[in-house]
Amino acid sequence: MLYLWIKAVHLIAVITFIAGLVTMALGGRLAQPEWRRVARRADYALASPALIVVWITGPTLAIMANWWHAPWLMAKLVFVIVLSALHGRLSATLRRLERDESTQPPAVFGRALPVTLISMAIVVALVIVKPF
Protein backbone atom coordinates (compact mmCIF):
# COMPACT_ATOMS: atom_id res chain seq x y z
CA MET A 1 0.00 0.00 0.00
CA LEU A 2 2.85 2.40 0.83
CA TYR A 3 4.36 1.70 -2.59
CA LEU A 4 1.15 2.83 -4.32
CA TRP A 5 1.04 6.08 -2.33
CA ILE A 6 4.66 6.84 -3.18
CA LYS A 7 3.92 6.02 -6.81
CA ALA A 8 0.94 8.41 -6.79
CA VAL A 9 3.04 11.19 -5.25
CA HIS A 10 5.76 10.52 -7.84
CA LEU A 11 3.30 10.76 -10.73
CA ILE A 12 1.75 13.97 -9.38
CA ALA A 13 5.24 15.46 -9.01
CA VAL A 14 6.20 14.42 -12.55
CA ILE A 15 3.08 16.02 -14.02
CA THR A 16 3.68 19.19 -12.01
CA PHE A 17 7.34 19.29 -13.04
CA ILE A 18 6.51 18.94 -16.74
CA ALA A 19 3.82 21.65 -16.45
CA GLY A 20 6.36 23.97 -14.85
CA LEU A 21 8.99 23.14 -17.47
CA VAL A 22 6.57 23.81 -20.33
CA THR A 23 5.58 27.12 -18.73
CA MET A 24 9.24 28.07 -18.31
CA ALA A 25 9.99 27.17 -21.94
CA LEU A 26 7.06 29.12 -23.34
CA GLY A 27 7.43 32.12 -21.02
CA GLY A 28 11.13 32.42 -21.73
CA ARG A 29 10.51 32.62 -25.48
CA LEU A 30 8.51 35.79 -25.11
CA ALA A 31 10.16 39.18 -24.89
CA GLN A 32 7.57 40.64 -22.53
CA PRO A 33 8.89 40.89 -18.95
CA GLU A 34 5.53 39.90 -17.47
CA TRP A 35 5.65 36.52 -19.25
CA ARG A 36 9.18 35.95 -18.03
CA ARG A 37 7.98 36.68 -14.50
CA VAL A 38 5.30 34.02 -14.98
CA ALA A 39 8.01 31.62 -16.16
CA ARG A 40 10.15 32.41 -13.09
CA ARG A 41 7.17 31.84 -10.79
CA ALA A 42 6.51 28.53 -12.54
CA ASP A 43 10.09 27.57 -11.73
CA TYR A 44 9.92 28.51 -8.05
CA ALA A 45 6.36 27.39 -7.36
CA LEU A 46 6.05 24.33 -9.63
CA ALA A 47 9.09 22.94 -11.36
CA SER A 48 11.77 23.16 -8.67
CA PRO A 49 9.75 21.74 -5.75
CA ALA A 50 8.26 19.04 -7.99
CA LEU A 51 11.70 18.03 -9.27
CA ILE A 52 12.89 17.54 -5.69
CA VAL A 53 9.91 15.27 -5.01
CA VAL A 54 10.54 13.37 -8.27
CA TRP A 55 14.16 12.72 -7.30
CA ILE A 56 13.14 11.52 -3.82
CA THR A 57 10.22 9.30 -4.80
CA GLY A 58 11.70 7.89 -8.02
CA PRO A 59 14.72 6.19 -6.47
CA THR A 60 12.53 5.12 -3.54
CA LEU A 61 10.21 3.31 -5.95
CA ALA A 62 13.16 1.75 -7.78
CA ILE A 63 14.55 0.43 -4.50
CA MET A 64 11.17 -0.85 -3.31
CA ALA A 65 10.50 -2.65 -6.61
CA ASN A 66 14.13 -3.81 -7.01
CA TRP A 67 14.42 -2.27 -10.50
CA TRP A 68 18.02 -1.01 -10.34
CA HIS A 69 19.20 -3.67 -12.78
CA ALA A 70 16.38 -3.17 -15.29
CA PRO A 71 17.65 -1.82 -18.64
CA TRP A 72 14.44 0.17 -19.23
CA LEU A 73 15.06 2.05 -15.96
CA MET A 74 18.62 2.92 -16.98
CA ALA A 75 17.32 4.24 -20.32
CA LYS A 76 14.62 6.20 -18.49
CA LEU A 77 17.20 7.76 -16.19
CA VAL A 78 19.06 9.16 -19.19
CA PHE A 79 15.98 11.14 -20.20
CA VAL A 80 15.19 12.12 -16.59
CA ILE A 81 18.71 13.56 -16.34
CA VAL A 82 18.18 15.40 -19.64
CA LEU A 83 14.97 16.95 -18.26
CA SER A 84 16.64 17.82 -14.96
CA ALA A 85 19.57 19.48 -16.76
CA LEU A 86 17.19 21.35 -19.05
CA HIS A 87 15.36 22.64 -15.99
CA GLY A 88 18.62 23.91 -14.53
CA ARG A 89 19.55 25.60 -17.78
CA LEU A 90 16.15 27.27 -18.19
CA SER A 91 16.12 28.39 -14.57
CA ALA A 92 19.58 29.94 -14.81
CA THR A 93 18.77 31.60 -18.13
CA LEU A 94 15.54 33.07 -16.78
CA ARG A 95 17.40 34.48 -13.76
CA ARG A 96 20.04 36.00 -16.04
CA LEU A 97 17.41 37.52 -18.34
CA GLU A 98 15.60 39.02 -15.37
CA ARG A 99 18.83 40.48 -13.99
CA ASP A 100 20.06 41.85 -17.33
CA GLU A 101 16.58 42.86 -18.53
CA SER A 102 17.39 41.43 -21.95
CA THR A 103 14.61 41.38 -24.54
CA GLN A 104 16.12 38.85 -26.96
CA PRO A 105 15.14 35.29 -25.97
CA PRO A 106 18.08 32.85 -26.09
CA ALA A 107 17.92 29.87 -28.45
CA VAL A 108 17.60 27.42 -25.56
CA PHE A 109 13.95 28.42 -25.17
CA GLY A 110 13.21 27.47 -28.77
CA ARG A 111 14.55 23.95 -28.21
CA ALA A 112 13.23 23.46 -24.69
CA LEU A 113 9.63 22.63 -25.55
CA PRO A 114 10.33 19.87 -28.09
CA VAL A 115 13.07 18.39 -25.90
CA THR A 116 10.67 18.38 -22.93
CA LEU A 117 7.79 16.78 -24.80
CA ILE A 118 9.86 14.17 -26.63
CA SER A 119 11.78 13.21 -23.47
CA MET A 120 8.54 12.97 -21.51
CA ALA A 121 6.97 10.74 -24.17
CA ILE A 122 9.99 8.43 -24.15
CA VAL A 123 9.98 8.22 -20.35
CA VAL A 124 6.26 7.37 -20.30
CA ALA A 125 6.72 4.72 -23.00
CA LEU A 126 9.64 3.14 -21.15
CA VAL A 127 7.74 3.03 -17.86
CA ILE A 128 4.54 1.61 -19.34
CA VAL A 129 5.94 -0.82 -21.91
CA LYS A 130 9.25 -1.77 -20.22
CA PRO A 131 10.57 -2.91 -23.63
CA PHE A 132 13.84 -4.35 -22.34
Image (cartoon, grey):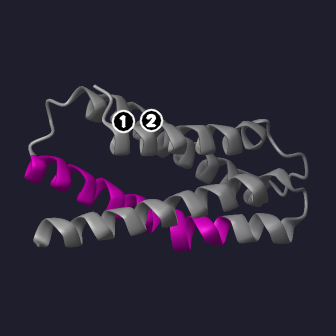
Above or below residue 69? Residue 21 is: below
Residue 54 place in picture, x, y as percent: 34, 58
Could you tell me which secondary element the residue under label 1 belongs to?
helix
Q: Over which residues does the magenta segment extend?
A: 40-65
Residue 118 place in picture, x, y as percent: 59, 38
Q: Amino acid at mark 1?
A: Lys
Magenta stretch, overall SS:
helix
Nearer to the camera, 80 or 121: 121
Name the image quarter holding the N terminus: bottom left
Identify the residue shown where x is 20% and y is 68%.
4
Name the image quarter holding the C terminus: top left
CA neighbours of label 1 inside 10 A, class few (<14), some (14 to 19), many (20+): many
Nearer to the camera, 84 or 34: 84
Alpha carbon separation for disc pair 1 and 2: 5 Å
Nearer to the camera, 9 or 129: 129
Q: Which residue is mark 2?
A: 79
CA neighbours of label 2 inside 10 A, class few (<14), some (14 to 19), many (20+): some
Q: Which residue is mark 1?
A: 76
Residue 95 place in picture, x, y as percent: 66, 56
Q: Amino acid at mark 2?
A: Phe
Asked whether, in this view, residue 107 is left or right of residue 122, the answer is right
Above or below residue 28? Residue 38 is: below
Identify the residue shown where x is 24% and y is 26%.
71
Q: Is residue 63 magenta?
A: yes
Identify the residue shown where x is 61% and y is 49%.
92
How many marks do you count on the picture?
2
Residue 129 place in picture, x, y as percent: 35, 39
Nearer to the camera, 79 or 72: 72
Q: Is residue 61 magenta?
A: yes
